[in-house]
Amino acid sequence: MRLPRRHFFRLLAGATAFPAASRLGWAQTYPSRPITMVIPYPPGGATDVVARILGQGMNASLGQPVIIENRGGANGSIGVGHVAHAVADGYTLVVGNWNTFVANGALYSLPYDLKNDFLPIALLSYAPVLITARKTMPANDLQQFISWLKANPDKAIDGHAGIGSIGHVVGIFFQKETGTRFQLIPYRGGGPAVQDLVAGHIDFIMNTATDTLAQVRAGTVKAYAVTAKSRLSALPDIPTVDESGLPNFYFSQWFGLWAPKATPNYIIGKLNSAVVKALVDPVVRHQLADSGEETFPPAQQTSEALGALHGAEIEKWWPIIQAAGIKAE
């Protein structure tokens, strides 16, 4: 039986509109359950701190709790890999950084593609590296510390968050810049390295300020310099590398939020909105600043800005890391 033309076109229009209506319904109900935010490191490090502050700030606008899940190992590549292969429904995200989304691509044969297996959501914050030593270190400033390292070649131990981490890369460049030699020992994240520094099991670390800020304030470690052009507002008494006789030795760790590829655009947009709202919250901003983190300007808190920075950093650092001979072990 042939349908009248007007009935046929009504049915066709209804069938065409159904997927759009379904998508609208899904968009309105997301999220309908808790969201898991994977941290590819053990608890206590900079990435963990940033994620927990952000997660708390996102809860209100999302209407669902953000659950933190720590999955450490292989300089963060295990946790990132878990998210790469997760269902792209917006319920499994990863807080990544320069280590996991830049350096690891030059160090490991990864079972995922850093450039194509993720969708950027938003830039979160950044923190310069803080050069800190055990409390019993005889040197009292950066130049004295460099002199001590030169007088004790290959004896000092520098702990870092893992092969290819920013602390590892900074340590290698520090040796070249200062003509010093020391041992570089990898840990499964910044938190465990800081614990051994406080205990005096290692001599120094050059990790993000977030990792050691609390210990510097407590007086359990010594801080020599911050690797930035200006002093940290959270530690205004600690001089910059320029002020300490090591000019232009700048390194900062940045953090971003990613989802698996194929995550619907409306979910990316909703998550970005939740991040932006969290980052303007005075409580969140204070907590980040108090932990040594700086937030990006609003114009850079977009998914496009994170994608652009990610691509530019890969182009810059992959050749440098390879030329420096840094290898995963």
Image (spheres, rainbow, N blue to C red):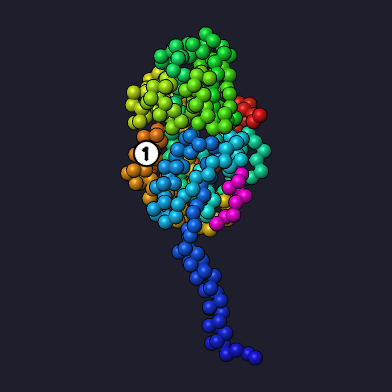
Can you see residue 107?
yes
Q: Residue at x 56, y 17 (%)?
A: 182
Q: Residue at x 54, y 37 (%)?
A: 41
Q: Position of residue 300 (x, y in %)?
A: 42, 45
Q: Is residue 129 magenta?
A: no
Q: Give SS at disc 1.
A: helix
Q: Is residue 84 magenta?
A: yes
Q: Residue at x 42, y 26 (%)?
A: 215
Total marks in image = 1
Please say if 191 is above or below 96.
above
Q: Looking at numbered disc 1 in the image, what kind of residue is underneath it? A: Gln
Neighbor class of circle 1 (other Cα within 10 Å; few <14, some 14-19, many 20+) is some
In this rendering, position of residue 287 left or right of residue 323: left
Q: Which residues are magenta?
A: 81-89
The answer to which image quadrant residue 4 occupies is bottom right
Q: Residue at x 64, y 30 (%)?
A: 328
Q: Quadrant of the N terminus?
A: bottom right
Q: Quadrant of the C terminus?
A: top right
From the image, tell me which residue sits under label 1: 287
Q: Position of residue 251 (x, y in %)?
A: 47, 29
The answer to which image quadrant residue 246 occupies is top left
